[in-house]
Structure formats: C-alpha cells, structure tokens
Amino acid sequence: MKKGYLLVFLAASMWGTLGIFAKLLYGFGLDPFTITFYRAIIAFGLLFVYNLSQGLQVKKHRLPFYAFYGFFAVFLFYILYFYTVKISSVSLAVLLLYSAPIYSTILGYFIFGERITPLKLAALLMAIMGVLLVVNPNGENVSRVAVVLGLLSGLTYALYGILAKLAVRNEKPEEALLYTIGFGALFLAPFSNFKIPLSSLPYLFGLAFFPTFLAYILYNTALKEIEVSRASIIATVEPVVALILAYLIFHEILTTKQVIGATLIILGSLILHIEEKNEKNQI
C-alpha cells in the first residue's frame, strides 16, 4: 500500500473533525465569525512559516484572484458550514456539505466542458435523493434555515474545488492556500470578537492545526504519489468520520431514513469521483 493512500485517509479524517471542533468551541460562547477568524489567522501563520521555509515568492499580480478565492472559499464557506453546525448538528451539516459533488459536476459541465455521463447522472440523482431523505426524515422538515445554509455551504465547497484547479496552475497548493486563507482572515476580521476565553485557545489551535494546516499538507504530499482522482475517492471517508465522531462525542443519532440518505449521498459522491477517474484514464 502506497504511503500516499494513508496520508489522504489521515487528511480526510482530520477534515471530518471540523464540525466537532466547532461544536466544542460553541461551548465557550464563541460565535461562528470569531471561530472561523481564529482558525484562518492561526493557520495563516503556520502556512506562512511553512511556505517561507520552501522559498516563498509573493506574486502581486495574482492577489486580486486570491481575494476573490478567499471570499468564497474561506469567508463564505467557513461561515456557512460552521453556522449550520451551530443551529443544527454536526451530522446534518456534514451531509449537506457533501452535496458539493452535485454542484461540482454541474459547474464542471458549464465551466470546463466536462461530460455528464449516464453514470454521473445516476449518481447525481442518488445524491439528490439522499439529501431529500436527510432533510425530511419523517415527513417533517428540519430547520429550513439550516437546510438552506447547509446546501449553500456545499455550493461554496464546490466553488472551492473549482477555484483550486485554477489556482494550482500557477502556484504550489501550499502557496495557494496561504494566499486564500490570508484573504479569508481579512474578510472575517471586521465581524469577529477578538476577546476570547483563554481556555478556548487549545481548541482554536487544534482547529487551525489539524483539519486546516496539517490535513492540507498531508493531502498535498500524498498527491506527489497518487492521482488526484484516486485521492478524491479515499477522501469520501470524511463524512463517515464526522458522523461516527458526532455519535461518540455528542450522541447524535440519525433516523433510519437519514441513514439511508447519508448512504446515498456518500455513494453518489464516490461514484462521481470514480467516474471522473475513469474518464481521465481514457484521455
């Protein structure tokens, strides 16, 4: 087994802790803007030191692109996801986040001219059916605000991936993340409360270090050994880890319909990644 597969698994498992950290930090009375700001600014500091050791060169002409990228991929994405966790649950938030492949496939068709094959269409329908089951488990809708914000977090997550494709054409992934998260922190700063309980700092550092800095470093290191398409398939372990941790730590329990919906969403995402891999192998 290649080391790259293990690194992707570890990175995706760390991403699965995002909602867990958010839920724990809400216990200190922090709001979503403050949590996401500290996540971004601490991760920016770590990434700056890392990139500096690799020979960082600032490309001023690329900064407007990264300002745009940071607004959608950090400011909007972080806030939408963390706020969904706040008003609903980790389980619902991560499952709605994983509607992202639906948007990615549709946007990929319009932006990059990527084909929507019959298998992709079936996977899309599967994921959409899964979302409907998750948000309407017993014929009664969960919080409409949570559903809307959760689905929007999936859209911004999809935009994150699309913008990342454009970013890494010119910069190394670590540099791209540095600029993106730096601008995200700037956008978050005016809305954040800088006075925080000292007891929350270890959790904020953990949030910035594990599922932000370290996870992306491990993932990008893995891509030196394995294909992006293969890594994406393994990374679908993220929602599974989040659901397991939410059950173990917060005793969040899904209904039978939600379990079926979760399975459809994850399988739909998995099929889309596998189909993408097969298409690239045929090129």
Image (spheres, helix red, strand yellow):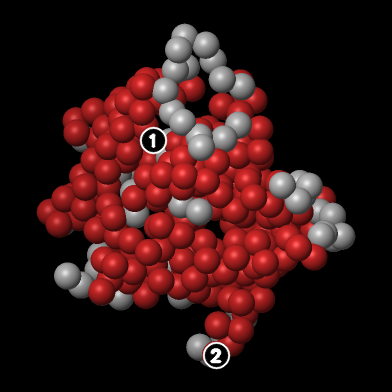
Say which of 176 and 12 sits in front: 12
The quadrant holding residue 88 is top right
Identify the residue at image location x=43%, y=28%: 254
252 over 32 or under it: above or below: above
Q: Residue at x 68, y 52 (%)?
A: 25
Task: Determine the residue positioned at 55% across, 82% down.
Answer: 51
Query: Between residues 135 and 179, which one lies in front from this camera angle?
Result: 135
Q: Which residue is disc 2 drawn over?
A: 53
- Image position of 263 (left or right of 202): left
Counting residues from the start of the chain, the first of labels 2 and 1 encountered is 2
**Relative to residue 47, is residue 35 drawn left or right?**
right
- Where residue 232 appears, as percent x and y from the top left, is 32, 55
Q: What element carries label 1?
A: helix
The N terminus, quarter of image: bottom left
Q: Which mark is residue 210?
A: none
How many residues crowd around disc 1 within 10 Å: few (fewer than 14), some, or many (20 or more)? Answer: many
Residue at the left extreme of this rendering: 282
Q: Name the residue under label 1.
A: 102
Find residue 136 and report its horizontal and vertical position in percent.
47, 17
Q: Is mark 2 on a helix, strand or loop?
A: helix
- Residue type marked 2: Ser
* Quarter holding residue 9: bottom left
Quick check: can you spot residue 115?
no
Q: In this view, does 86 lie above or below 196?
A: above
User: x and y percent of residue 258 in the render?
Assistant: 40, 25
